């Protein structure tokens, strides 16, 4: 069989966005809205997910499912990426911290929507590959740091938005500390058998309110001792 071209991938990417929109409509009761932000869907229509997975699974990059990327990790299902981004609500003037770069897909989606993305990845091989992909694609809004994401990236704090792409049993205090008053964090919270996508809003006084959304299943947030 002949290899897939960029035109083929572009068609599949458009189809992926359509499927996400249908999924959002069908899940409207659970997520509390009938449609996701058009800015988020447009961003996902621009970012080449097939460049952020191993070559062996690139033909499946635009199916609405997680895919293996190595080290027993996966790239999240596109619908979950869209939902988390929608809940995060990044704006063009925002500085965003991402915890868990993986191979850089979600960071690039965020880079389409925010002013600057600071992404932390604990697995060096992922970080190096993501950096190479970002350079190749000319994405200059995303910077990557190798380290323990649960500690955030204090050098560039505070952040308007924080996105965590791995599950924590409780919200790491350094991330709460690095979130600006008026800022928002989205992360999976809970033990493996009972995780929920959670939105954390910090008010002007620094108090944080937690709102649980849909049940999810993420790998656990890795820390460095």
Image (cartoon, rainbow, N blue to C red):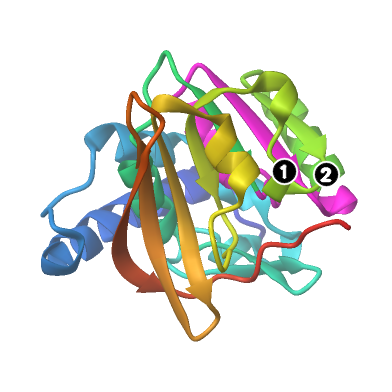
- Does residue 82 lie above or below 1 as drawn? above
* CA gap, disc 2 and disc 1: 8 Å
Determine which of the numbered discs, if any, sits on residue 151 in the image: 1
Determine which of the numbered discs, if any, sits on residue 172 in the image: none
Seen from the viewer's position, the closer of residues 216 and 191 is 191
| Residue receiving disc 2 | 147
Measuring 41% from the left and 25% from the top, which residue is drawn there?
A: 181
Magenta range:
100-126
Judged by depth in the image, the label closer to the viewer, 2 or 1, is 1
Question: Viewed as shown, does residue 55 lie left or right of 61?
Answer: right
Question: Viewed as shown, does residue 93 lie left or right of 126?
Answer: left
Q: Is residue 153 visible?
A: yes
- Does residue 128 lie above or below 92 as drawn? below
Measuring 44% from the left and 53% from the top, which residue is drawn there?
A: 81
Seen from the viewer's position, the closer of residues 81 and 55 is 81
Seen from the viewer's position, the closer of residues 54 and 68 is 68
Which element is circle 2 on?
loop
Measuring 53% from the left and 62% from the top, which residue is drawn there?
A: 76
């Amino acid at each position: 069989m002949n290899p897939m071209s960029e035109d083929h991938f572009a068609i599949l990417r458009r189809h992926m966005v359509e499927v996400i929109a249908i999924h959002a409509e069908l899940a409207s009761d659970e997520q509390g809205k009938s449609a996701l932000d058009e800015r988020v869907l447009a961003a996902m229509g621009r970012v080449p997910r097939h460049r952020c997975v191993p070559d062996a699974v690139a033909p499946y990059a635009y199916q609405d499912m997680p895919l293996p990327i190595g080290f027993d990790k996966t790239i999240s299902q596109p619908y979950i990426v869209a939902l988390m981004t929608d809940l995060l609500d990044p704006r063009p003037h925002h500085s965003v911290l991402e915890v868990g770069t993986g191979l850089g897909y979600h960071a690039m989606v965020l880079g389409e929507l925010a002013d600057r993305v600071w992404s932390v990845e604990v697995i060096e091989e992922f970080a190096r590959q993501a950096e190479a992909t970002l350079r190749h694609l000319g994405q200059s809004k995303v910077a990557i740091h190798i380290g323990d994401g649960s500690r955030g990236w204090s050098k560039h704090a505070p952040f308007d938005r924080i996105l965590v792409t791995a599950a924590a049993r409780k919200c790491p205090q350094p991330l709460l500390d690095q979130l600006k008053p008026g800022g928002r964090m989205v992360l999976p919270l809970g033990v493996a058998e009972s995780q929920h996508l959670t939105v954390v809003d910090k008010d002007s006084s620094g108090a944080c309110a937690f709102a649980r959304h849909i049940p999810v299943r993420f790998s656990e947030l890795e820390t460095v001792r």
